Image (cartoon, rainbow, N blue to C red):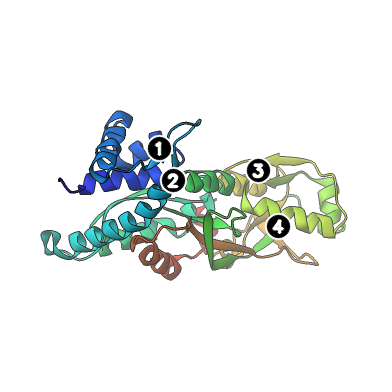
């Protein structure tokens, strides 16, 4: 009787942890038909049905649930074996697709990738940048191995570990700043357009909470999904908005003036998020590495 192959177990693992066979096939860089064939071969070898295909989408059977735990441990051992002996180089290997928001992409992500590539030269990194709501959907669907997002996930299928918080400050262009008028944020929001990121971004939550504390329900907004553009519009006097505090403390742009607000904007907590049940050693290793290098401070001259 033949034994299951690593390729068959990999096909089963990704099919079991992704939202559909199409995404699982993409993770393995094979066709859906090849993925289905490997799973069929595995079912024949084990003489057990691993997926219930009677509904709209294939679901794990009880036997499939049992195998998933065992297959995860086998694949984890294989990865450890490969990273220990392959080309006599230490470190992780394979493909790692992870998600971050644009603030991360503009600040700590490049250095993180450089460090990760040096520590794990056999690891092929694929960063994906988008707002938190999209990253969460892709993580749940199995398209991402992990993601760094603002806040904790409300989904039971996703685990979250807090790793960092970012602080924000209100900014106004020098050209809009009038010392003879009230510079209270609520008064300025009545006079000027609010420049901010769109809904779905983590900063939208802290902004909405702050506006509620100020009893502000209506405000004219320009939303843009790019931090650089938001910062640029604030500097050009299109409106007022807020930027990460670290950008200002590392080289304040003379065209911008920091505004005091009472209460201040809440801090935005960021978390390392991954799928529940993913026991691969790549997850805790990356979590430690991210924690060591995540840093939202960046000189404003690099952005504006």
Tag 3 secondary structure: loop
Q: Which residue is mark 2?
A: 142
Q: What's the residue at 33%, 63% (across, down)?
A: 281
Question: Could you say which disc has been placed on residue 206 in the image?
Answer: 4
Q: CA distance from mark 3 to mark 1?
A: 27 Å
Q: Earlier in the sequence, mark 3 or mark 2?
A: 2
Q: What's the residue at 43%, 45% (across, down)?
A: 61
The image shows residue 85 at horizontal and vertical percentages of: 14, 63
Contact between marks 1 and 2 (CB within 8 A): the answer is: yes
The image shows residue 21 at horizontal and vertical percentages of: 39, 36
Q: What's the residue at 14%, 59% (across, down)?
A: 86
Q: Decide if residue 266 is on the left or right side of residue 66.
A: right
Front residue of 140 and 246: 140
Contact between marks 3 and 1 (CB within 8 A): the answer is: no
Q: Which residue is mark 3?
A: 198
Q: Earlier in the sequence, mark 4 or mark 1?
A: 1
Q: Which residue is mark 1?
A: 23
192 w.r.t. 172: above or below? above
Which marked residue is nearer to the observer: mark 3 or mark 2?
2
């Amino acid at each position: 009787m033949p034994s299951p192959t690593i390729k068959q177990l990999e096909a089963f693992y990704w099919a079991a942890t992704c939202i559909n066979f199409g995404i699982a096939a993409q993770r393995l860089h094979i066709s859906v038909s090849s993925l289905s064939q490997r799973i069929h071969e595995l079912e024949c070898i084990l003489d057990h049905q691993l997926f219930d295909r009677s509904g709209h989408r294939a679901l794990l059977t009880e036997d499939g649930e049992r195998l998933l735990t065992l297959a995860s441990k086998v694949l984890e051992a294989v990865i450890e074996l490969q990273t220990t002996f392959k080309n006599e180089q230490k470190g992780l290997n394979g493909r790692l697709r992870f998600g971050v928001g644009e603030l991360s992409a503009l600040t700590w992500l490049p250095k993180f990738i450089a460090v990760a590539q040096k520590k794990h030269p056999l690891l092929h990194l694929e960063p994906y940048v988008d707002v938190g709501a999209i990253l969460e959907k892709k993580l749940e669907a199995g398209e991402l191995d992990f993601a760094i997002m603002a806040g904790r996930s409300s989904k039971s299928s996703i685990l979250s570990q807090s790793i960092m918080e970012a602080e924000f400050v209100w900014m106004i262009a020098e050209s809009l700043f009038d010392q003879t008028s009230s510079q209270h944020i609520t008064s300025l929001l009545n006079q000027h357009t609010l420049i901010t990121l769109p809904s779905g971004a983590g900063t939208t939550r802290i902004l909405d909470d702050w506006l509620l504390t100020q009893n502000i329900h209506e405000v004219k907004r320009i939303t843009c999904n790019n931090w650089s553009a938001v910062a640029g519009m604030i500097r050009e006097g299109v409106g007022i908005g807020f930027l990460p505090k670290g950008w200002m403390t590392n080289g304040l742009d003379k065209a911008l003036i920091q505004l005091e607000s009472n209460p201040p904007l809440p801090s935005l907590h960021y978390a390392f998020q991954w799928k529940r049940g993913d026991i691969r050693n790549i997850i805790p290793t990356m979590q430690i590495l991210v924690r060591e290098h995540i840093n939202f401070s960046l000189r404003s001259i690099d952005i504006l």
